[in-house]
Image (cartoon, grey):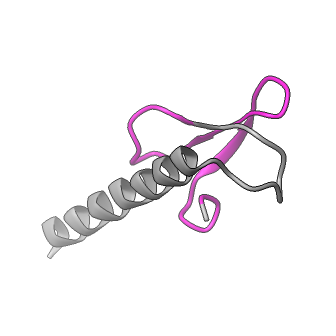
């Protein structure tokens, strides 16, 4: 979901991955290996990060019009 939303994956320590996006403030850290179930709080963090990026993209599009 993060990759589809334009986030870039950076490696982290152990099984952690960090995700960044030019429109997202800071970075998002997700623990666990790919294909493993995410914790509920991590799912919420991911959804919130994607929502923030989408809102900023919509705001930029409105400014361009």
| Quadrant of the snapshot with the N terminus | bottom right
**SS assignment for the magenta stretch, majority:** loop
Report whether 26 appears left or right of 56: right
* Residue at the farthest bottom position: 65
Residue at image point 64% right, 60% down: 3
Residue at image point 36% right, 64% down: 54
Q: Position of residue 45 (x, y in %)?
A: 47, 47
| Quadrant of the snapshot with the C terminus | bottom left
Q: Position of residue 9 (x, y in %)?
A: 70, 45
Rendered view: 42 above or below 3: above
Rendered view: 8 above or below 61: above
Q: Nearer the viewer, residue 51 or 24?
A: 51
* Residue at the farthest front position: 40
Residue 12 drawn in magenta: yes
* Residue at the farthest top position: 13
Choose top left, top right, bottom left or bottom right for residue 4: bottom right
Rendered view: 14 above or below 17: above
Q: Nearer the viewer, residue 20 or 63?
A: 20
Q: Nearer the viewer, residue 56 or 36?
A: 36
Report whether 19 appears left or right of 47: right
Residue at image point 68% right, 51% down: 38
Q: Position of residue 11 (x, y in %)?
A: 78, 33
Rendered view: 26 above or below 51: above
Residue at image point 18% right, 69% down: 64
Tally of numbered discs: 0
Q: Position of residue 30 (x, y in %)?
A: 65, 40
Residue 44 drawn in magenta: no
Which region shows up in magenta?
2-28
């Amino acid at each position: 979901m993060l990759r589809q939303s334009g986030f870039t994956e950076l490696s982290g320590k152990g099984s952690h991955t960090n995700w960044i996006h030019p429109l997202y403030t800071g970075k998002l850290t997700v623990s666990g290996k790919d294909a493993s179930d995410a914790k509920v709080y991590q799912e919420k963090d991911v959804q919130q990060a994607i929502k923030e990026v989408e809102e900023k993209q919509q705001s930029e599009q409105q400014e361009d019009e």
